[in-house]
Image (cartoon, rainbow, N blue to C red):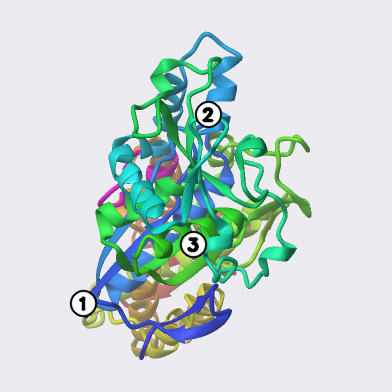
Amino acid sequence: MTIRLYDSRQQALVDFVPLVPGQVGLYVCGPTVQSSPHIGHLRSALVYDLWRRWFTYRGLDVTLVRNVTDIDDKILALAADTTEEGWARAYRTELEFPAGYQALGILPPPYEPRATASVSEMQQIITTLLDKGHAYVAPDGSGDVYFDTASWPTYGALTNQSIDDMAPAADADPRGKRDPRDFALWKGHKSDEPQSASWASPWGEGRPGWHIECSAMSARYLGEAFDIHGGGLDLRFPHHENELAQSTAAGMGFASHWMHNGLVAVEGQKMSKSLGNSIFAADFLAQARPVVVRYFFSAAHYRSTIDYHEGALLEAEAALDRVETFLERAQRRLADTRFAGVGARVVPDEFGEAMDDDLNVPQAVAVLHDTVRAGNVALDDGDLDAAARAWQHVAARVPVLGSDPTAPEWRAGDEGDAHRAPGTLVDVLLAARQQARADRDFSRADEIRGVLTGAGITIEDTPSGSHWSLEQ
């Protein structure tokens, strides 16, 4: 089946046809490293990790580029309040991000470029825009260079806006602009800014504007035409609108498709510093097993807003535990039977159809849980053939989502050992019960069974041995 995705520019579901057969070029706007990562950063990175995994599963070779914005007004403003240089603050903050990505099993992108490493490419694009008459040097001597929005008739195409309805661009001193909506391509050096945040250019010392950074990095690593540009919904305007305008005005094909992930709200409110409700990644990851946090973010549709509320991670834990319990129960029950080595794990059609439909993970997860329920019924009924098929299907699906709770990477270290400990204790008690039965000490065997039953554990005595599972 063809993969379909929601193209934000076309505002429609479209068939995905890569520019180069068998390959996908995906550029994602990464973080501006001004402060510690929050859960919005985790959610965005995870969305494109899921897309990457699914494209790969469907046999496509994915080149994902996720940039790091390490030069920006906000970084410099925050650094100015301290004795720290802007570049030092950016680098120190950037180092905080990989821990969260790694904890959630987010695959490292092939390229994760810093903006400051592509300044020469940015200057080349600006020169092209000046030569084509789509940019101008501010006449006030500031050294600023602006994109001339009036020169580009399709400005507003991404967000379907008329230029007359747009608010003025607030990214630079408006005194050097021809039109308030013109945006900065290059910002002349200011006397109160550190020299370390300045580069030589044909227009004088200065630094790049925010929007030109992504145009340069996407072209450098994916070429002037590539398949998909992604990022958070809050970047759609003005950032992505301006990227599209300047890149196409410079003669680039740019992105064939635009993709935007939903944001994270907290108790129904937008997460923001002004409201004081920002949740930092490290604090969030401390609340639950990382695989549970990954499941929590993954289970929502990537374009929807996730509303985090008290108890949300407990709900995710309970849902994932049902999957984990079934996988472990089935593995124990099917051990030493002809079903133990079931065939290749192929994702079933209904799961694949959901994923092909604009990465409809909620529908795919619903199919997953239906299979878990059917598998548990089969185990209860002793239908090992049906149980094996269910186990095979579930075991094939969860790795595609990167959320297989039984995978070694989620069970490494102290947290994994702690999670395995209850199962180990149950196995010890079962062995003691088995020995009591062999010794015909049925009173002791019944006592152990009663202890386990009281703890919510169901015991199944079968010809191949005793098996246990958590009560559903």
Q: CA distance from mark 2 to mark 1?
A: 75 Å
Cα–Cα gap, marks 3 and 2? 25 Å
Residue 334, placed above or below residue 459:
below
- Whole-percent x and y of residue 109? 30, 52
The label number, if any, that marks residue 341 in the structure image: 1
Asked whether disc 2 touches disc 1, contact meaning CB atoms under 8 Å apart, the reply is no
Q: Give 156 or 437, whichever is nearer the viewer.
A: 156
Observer-nearest of 174 and 272 = 174
Label 3 sits on residue: 245
Res 141 label: 2
In the rendering, at what x and y percent does residue 61 appear? 22, 69
Give the foreground label among 1 and 3.
3
**Residue type pointed to by label 3:** Ala
Between 50 and 178, which is closer to the camera in this rendering?
Answer: 178
**Residue 188 showing in the rendered view:** yes
Q: Residue at x 53, y 21 (%)?
A: 190
Tell me the amino acid under the disc marked 1: Gly
User: How dense is the environment of label 1, judged by Cα within 10 Å: few (below 14), some, or many (20 and up)?
Assistant: few
Q: Which residues are magenta?
A: 100-114
- Residue 93 belongs to the span the image colors magenta: no
- Looking at the image, is mark 2 or mark 1 nearer the viewer? 2
**Amino acid carrying mark 2 in the image:** Gly
Q: Quadrant of the N terminus?
A: bottom left
Is residue 443 shown to the viewer in this render? no
How far is mark 1 from mark 3, CA to CA?
Answer: 56 Å
Crowding at dot 3, Cα within 10 Å, few <14 / some 14-19 / many 20+, comes out as many
Q: Position of residue 120 (x, y in %)?
A: 29, 39
Which one is earlier in the sequence, the residue at label 1 or at label 3? 3
Quarter of the figure with residue 281? top right
N-term mark: 3 or 2: 2
